[in-house]
Image: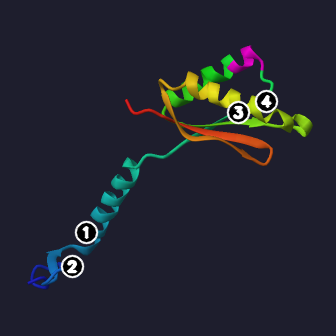
């Protein structure tokens, strides 16, 4: 039947019992399949991670400024990576860094949710905040 119509016999589902085949133009079938795959791929969301860096003794004005940026990032739907960077001997202020990150989490709890609590990794104390769903 396919030869009479000058078309191709395309196996659609080989694992079915019996296998499913269609009579159609093979190039057009491949084109439609690529188009479908591309549409599915474009619908997947890409996770953007934005970073905010603090020092262990960040001043109030600097903290407010960075908090405002963090709010903007979360409202845009980006994941936030807030970290306190300890330079040299400032590593002795670990508690201050943790307090700063927990304060940020508390200030942003209306628009974001803490994904990972503050954790010390080398000279950085890192915390992740994800945006809340609307």
Kindly indicate the quadrant of the structure image that contains residue 10.
Answer: bottom left
Earlier in the chain: of badge 1 and badge 2, it is 2
Front of the two marks 1 and 4? 4
Q: Residue at x 22, y 81 (%)?
A: 15
Of marks 3 and 2, the one in the foreground: 3
Q: Position of residue 118 (x, y in %)?
A: 65, 39
Nearest to viewer (mark 3 / mark 4): 3
Q: CA distance from mark 3 to mark 4?
A: 11 Å
Q: x, y percentage for residue 114? A: 54, 36
- Per the model, the C-alpha gap separating discs 1 and 2 is 8 Å
Q: Who comes first in sequence, dot 1 or dot 3?
A: 1
**Residue located farthest toward the top when viewing the structure as drawn:** 61
Is disc 1 in contact with disc 3, using a CB cutoff of under 8 Å?
A: no
Q: Which residue is mark 3?
A: 98
Residue labelled with disc 4: 55
Residue nearest the viewer, comparing 105 with 1: 105
Which element type, helix, strand or loop, lies under badge 2? strand
Q: Which residue is mark 2?
A: 10
User: Residue drawn 21% across and 73% down?
Assistant: 25
Is 14 situated left or right of 115 in this image? Answer: left
Residue depicted at x 39% and y 54%: 41
Q: Magenta segment, principal secondary structure?
A: helix
Quick check: is 95 in the magenta stretch?
no
The answer to the question of whether label 1 and label 2 lie on touching residues, with beta carbons closer than 8 A, is yes
Q: Earlier in the sequence, mark 1 or mark 4?
A: 1
From which residue to which does the magenta span run? 59-63
In the displayed structure image, the side of residue 35 where residue 74 appears, left or right: right
Task: Name the secondary structure under disc 3.
Answer: helix
Task: Please identify the residue farthest to the right as the structure is shown.
Answer: 89
Looking at the rendered image, the quarter that the C terminus falls into is: top left
Lower position in the chain sequence, tag 3 or tag 4: 4
**Which residue has dot 1 on it?**
29
């Amino acid at each position: 039947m396919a030869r009479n119509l000058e078309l191709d016999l395309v196996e659609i589902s080989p694992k079915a019992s019996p296998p499913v085949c269609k009579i159609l133009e093979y190039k057009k079938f491949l084109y439609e399949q690529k188009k479908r795959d591309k549409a599915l791929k474009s619908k997947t969301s890409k996770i953007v991670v934005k970073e905010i860096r603090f020092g262990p003794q960040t001043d109030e004005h600097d903290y407010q400024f960075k908090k405002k940026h963090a709010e903007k990032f979360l409202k845009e739907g980006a994941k936030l990576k807030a970290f306190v960077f300890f330079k040299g001997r400032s590593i002795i202020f670990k508690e201050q860094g943790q307090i700063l990150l927990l304060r940020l989490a508390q200030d942003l709890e209306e628009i974001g949710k803490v994904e990972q609590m503050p954790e010390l990794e080398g000279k950085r104390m890192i915390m992740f905040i994800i945006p809340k769903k609307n």
